[in-house]
Image (spheres, helix red, strand yellow):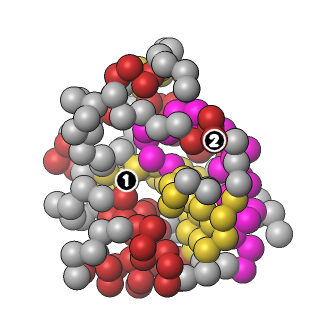
Amino acid sequence: MVRGREEVTGVLLVGGASRRFGSPKALARLGDETLAERAYRILGEAFERVIVVGKASDDLPLPFSVLDDGSEERAAIVGVAAGVRFADSEVCVVLPTDMPFVTAELLASLAGAIADGDAAVVQTGPLPGAFRRSVLPILERWIAVGELGLQEALKEVETRVVEVEPELLRNVNTPADLTSRR
């Protein structure tokens, strides 16, 4: 069953540490957009509702509000849990800001692939991914005990894997990744 745009909340994660990048990835530019603006636009093409989750303390100058994830930890599991918690829908599709080649079609396919399962992820790992509200207690339990591996936590739930073109899943770890082609 493919979910409609109105039944899913798009969640943009902007709270990464950016250690290898050297500055906040959300503010890096690709063409005439920052990575955060680009990801927000792509999520908006796929879904009617989009929220942004990160660290209020980062005080990033973005053209949209950022919901604080409520944790000092910088880990994808924290952002995903916060996104699921803040969303007003049963299903969220989560996109980290450092994956600028993802398409709206790919995000919509994740939402459709979740069906009656708990999560749908791409072949390379847990993000981007679709997550049902039912995963929240599991993610929160993992966070509470200091286990921050999202991929490991998802082994406790029914997770579907969606095979997509690897080029769409390239992430940006250094400024050179914005211009290089693999």
Magenta-colored span: 95-116
Return the residue at label 1.
53
Image position of 27 (left or right of 121): left
Q: Nearer the viewer, residue 51 or 166?
A: 166
Identify the residue at horizontal 22%, vertical 49% (top origin): 56
Crowd band around label 1 with a 10 angstrom C-alpha radius: few (<14), some (14–19), many (20+): many
Query: Where is residue 168 drawn, in percent x and y?
Result: 62, 38
Label ID, residue 166: 2
Q: Amino acid at mark 2?
A: Pro
Indicate yes or no whether the magenta region holds residue 47.
Answer: no
Identify the residue at horizontal 73%, vertical 65% (top origin): 113
Image position of 154 (left or right of 106): left
Identify the residue at horizontal 22%, vertical 39% (top origin): 19
Q: Nearer the viewer, residue 136 or 167?
A: 167
Query: Where is residue 162 drawn, in percent x and y?
Result: 69, 59
Please say if 29 is above or below 14.
above
Q: Quadrant of the N terminus?
A: bottom right
CA gap between label 2 and label 1 equals 25 Å
